[in-house]
Amino acid sequence: MSLQGKKVIITGATSGIGRELTLQLSEKGCIVGITGRRKHLLEELSGEMTGKSFIRQMDVSKPEEAQQELLSLIDEMGGLDIIVLNAGVSSKNREFKWEPERNLIDTNVTGFCALLNTAYHHFAEQRSGHIVGISSIASFLPNPGSMGYNASKAFISNYMQGVRLRIKKAGLPIDVTDILPGYIYTPMTEHRNDMFWVSTVDKGTAQIVRAIEKKKFKAYITRRWFWVAALVRNIPHRVWKYIS
């Protein structure tokens, strides 16, 4: 599928994968709407884009407000073909405090579902559309130091699978793509020293763009992480306490 002229909205576009995806899709000829909490970063990014762009300040941890902002942005853009639900936060939370856990869930789970729901109904009404969600290889890896983050990514993948089945049963022409990145150099990961098979953000994002073009059900970024996912699915629960 050619992306030329497609209207795309990317949430969480101010850094990392979201930022690079914005630039690469703009170069592909997409009309891109970008959202994030920091308006000055959205304005800076808009200035770097090669094609037409729209910006909208949005905090996905406030779901009802974010839904209204999304609908307003769609209206301003004159429609929507693809939404990339990328906004998310990471927290180690090794002391298992409630406040960071709640903030993560509000953003990664509640905010994600609210915006997916809004996009779903818009696409169902117009009888076309493509929902892309950014999950993670972490969805397969229980981690006592970042339980909320890993579980939120597992939720995202499972939720999208359910949405895909709902779409199929309803006979709607809507595509759903689950993106599962492994380790990628971004501001979210730059402090870590335990990463392997690390991809640059431009290489990883280029593979995400190809997955969107091909309307894949699921894409591991980079592709070698498929084998890690296949392996960890078969690790017995009792073994995790020795390797996590």
Image: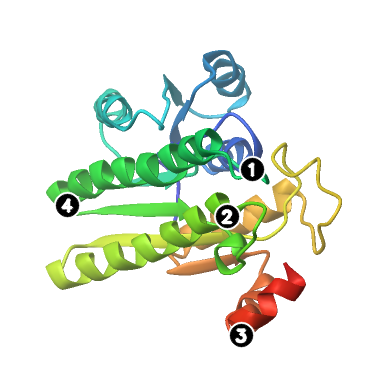
Give the residue pinned by disc 1.
93
In percent of width and height, residue 160 lies at 36, 61
Q: Tag 1, which secondary structure?
A: loop
Q: Amino acid at mark 3?
A: Pro
Tell me, yes or no, whether the two marked residues, 1 and 2, touch with CB atoms within 8 Å: yes
Could you tell me how far apart the alpha carbons at marks 2 and 4 are, in whole angstroms? Answer: 34 Å
Query: Which of label 1 and label 4 is nearer to you?
Result: 1
Taking the spot 33% from the left edge, 28% from the top edge, the residue there is 66
Q: Amino acid at mark 1?
A: Asn
Q: Tag 2, which secondary structure?
A: helix
**Numbered label attached to residue 236:** 3
Give the residue pinned by disc 2.
147
Q: Amino acid at mark 2?
A: Met
Taking the spot 43% from the left edge, 45% from the top edge, the residue there is 85
Q: Amino acid at mark 4?
A: Ala
Viewer can see residue 30: no
The tag earlier along the polypeptide, 1 or 4, is 1
In percent of width and height, residue 122 lies at 20, 43
Taking the spot 79% from the left edge, 41% from the top edge, the residue there is 190
- Picture layout, residue 57 above or below residue 111: above
Give the residue pinned by disc 4.
124
Q: Residue most toward the right?
A: 193
Report the side of 138 relative to 216 (left or right).
Answer: right
Query: Which of label 2 and label 4 is nearer to you?
Result: 2
Tell me, yes or no, whether the two marked residues, 2 and 4, touch with CB atoms within 8 Å: no
**Numbered label attached to residue 235:** none
The tag earlier along the polypeptide, 1 or 3, is 1
Report the side of 120 relative to 195 (left or right).
Answer: left
Label 2 crowd bin: few (<14), some (14–19), many (20+), radius 10 Å: some
